[in-house]
Image: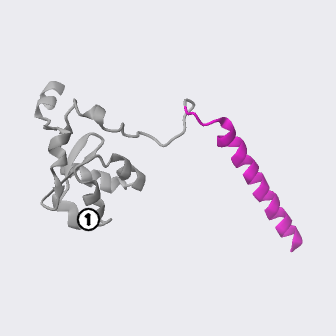
């Protein structure tokens, strides 16, 4: 069954996608999927300029940075026309999957726990002194 699904996927090269960056044909890439947003340009809540700036390229990072709602993510699925060809995927930046800091992160425990803890303690002490003066 999975093999049958793979045959129905339309693949586009980066070269093909980059040709679609105008008002008559606006395509973007999100997480290796290709979206034709031409009919959505005027409806986009952030304005059509935002989509035009990303047209013909990978908009994954910008899409995730904005923090789109669940409804927006569901709506976006209706514009999928295919996927980036597997040979071209290494040319794109790897999509970020999570913003959660993990144990494997390069951040130290010092910056993740001690500094915020000391900051919270300092704020609590300033608040206590402020209340004591009244």
Residue at position x 81%, y 62% from top? Answer: 126
Q: Residue furthest bottom?
A: 134
Mark 1 = which residue? 48
Quadrant where the C terminus sits is bottom right
Residue at position x 60%, y 37% from top? Answer: 107
Viewer-proximal residue among 54 and 121: 54
131 falls in the magenta region = yes
Residue 90 at what x, y percent from top left? 30, 32
71 falls in the magenta region = no
Residue 80 at what x, y percent from top left? 19, 47
Left or right of residue 98, residue 4 in this image: left
Magenta segment's dominant SS is helix
Total numbered circles: 1
Residue 25 at what x, y percent from top left? 14, 56
Quadrant where the N terminus sits is top left
Residue 12 at what x, y percent from top left? 15, 39
Q: Quadrant of residue 86?
A: top left
Q: Residue furthest right?
A: 133
Q: How is the image coloured?
A: one colour
Tell me the SS state at disc 1. helix
Left or right of residue 125, residue 58 in this image: left
Q: Which residues are magenta?
A: 105-134
Residue at position x 30%, y 61% from top? Answer: 50
Residue at position x 45%, y 40% from top? Answer: 98
Crowding around mark 1 (Cα neighbors within 10 Å: few <14, some 14 to 19, many 20+) is some
User: Is residue 92 depicted above or below 132 in this figure?
Assistant: above
Viewer-proximal residue among 89 and 82: 89
């Amino acid at each position: 069954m999975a093999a049958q699904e793979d045959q129905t996927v339309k693949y586009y090269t980066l070269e093909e996608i980059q040709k679609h960056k105008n008002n008559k044909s606006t395509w973007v890439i999100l997480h290796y999927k290709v979206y034709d947003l031409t009919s959505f340009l005027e409806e986009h809540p952030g304005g059509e300029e935002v989509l035009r700036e990303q047209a013909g390229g990978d908009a994954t990072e910008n899409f995730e940075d904005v923090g789109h709602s669940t409804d927006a993510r569901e709506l976006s699925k209706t514009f999928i026309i295919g996927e980036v060809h597997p040979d071209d995927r290494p040319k794109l930046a790897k999509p970020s999957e999570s913003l959660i800091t993990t144990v494997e992160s390069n951040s130290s425990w010092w910056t993740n726990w001690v500094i915020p803890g000391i900051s919270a303690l300092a704020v609590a002490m300033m608040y206590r002194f402020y209340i004591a003066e009244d």
